[in-house]
Image (cartoon, rainbow, N blue to C red):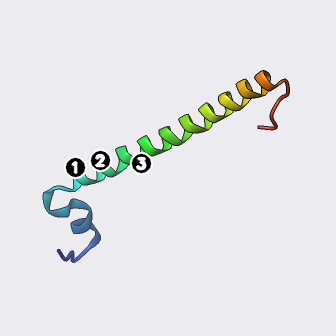
Amino acid sequence: MYWSNLTDFLVMGGYGAFVWWSFGLTFILFIGEWISLIRSRKATCKKLGKIRGYETPH
């Protein structure tokens, strides 16, 4: 598919709203997952440090 200008690219033949909304939602979910993993790792390291009797540097 070829686009003659930026507007045609963004509209994507009438499917642009769905396509860009899907990309945006996926990006937001990836960021949320990344933040969740960081928090989970920190909590796990903290619990493990308490079990072993020392604090981890995280």
Lower position in the chain sequence, tag 3 or tag 1: 1
Q: Quadrant of residue 41?
A: top right
Q: Amino acid at mark 1?
A: Phe
Q: Quadrant of residue 4?
A: bottom left
* Along the viewing direction, whichever of 43 and 51 lies nearer the viewer: 51
Is residue 45 shown left or right of residue 11? right
Q: Amino acid at mark 2?
A: Trp
* Along the viewing direction, whichever of 25 and 40 lies nearer the viewer: 40
User: Residue 56: where, in percent of width, then height?
Assistant: 80, 34
User: What residue did someone put label 2 on?
Assistant: 21
Instruction: Mark 1: give few (<14), some (14-19) or many (20+) Cα within 10 Å.
Output: few
Residue beneath the point at 49% across and 38% down: 32
Which residue appears farthest toward the left when viewing the image? 14
Mark 3: secondary structure: helix
Which residue appears farthest toward the front when viewing the image? 52
Mark 2: secondary structure: helix
The image shows residue 54, relative to residue 21, as above or below, that is above
Q: CA distance from mark 2 to mark 3?
A: 10 Å
Q: Amino acid at mark 3?
A: Phe
Q: CA distance from mark 3 to mark 1?
A: 14 Å
Residue beneath the point at 17% across and 74% down: 1
The image shows residue 4, relative to residue 27, as above or below, that is below
Q: Are marks 3 and 1 in contact (CB under 8 Å)?
A: no
Which residue appears farthest toward the right when viewing the image? 54
Residue beneath the point at 73% across and 27% down: 48
User: What residue did someone put label 3 on?
Assistant: 27
Instruction: Mark 2: give few (<14), some (14-19) or many (20+) Cα within 10 Å.
Output: few
User: What residue did someone put label 1 on?
Assistant: 18
Frontmost of labels 3 and 1 is: 3
User: Residue 36: where, in percent of width, then height?
Assistant: 54, 34
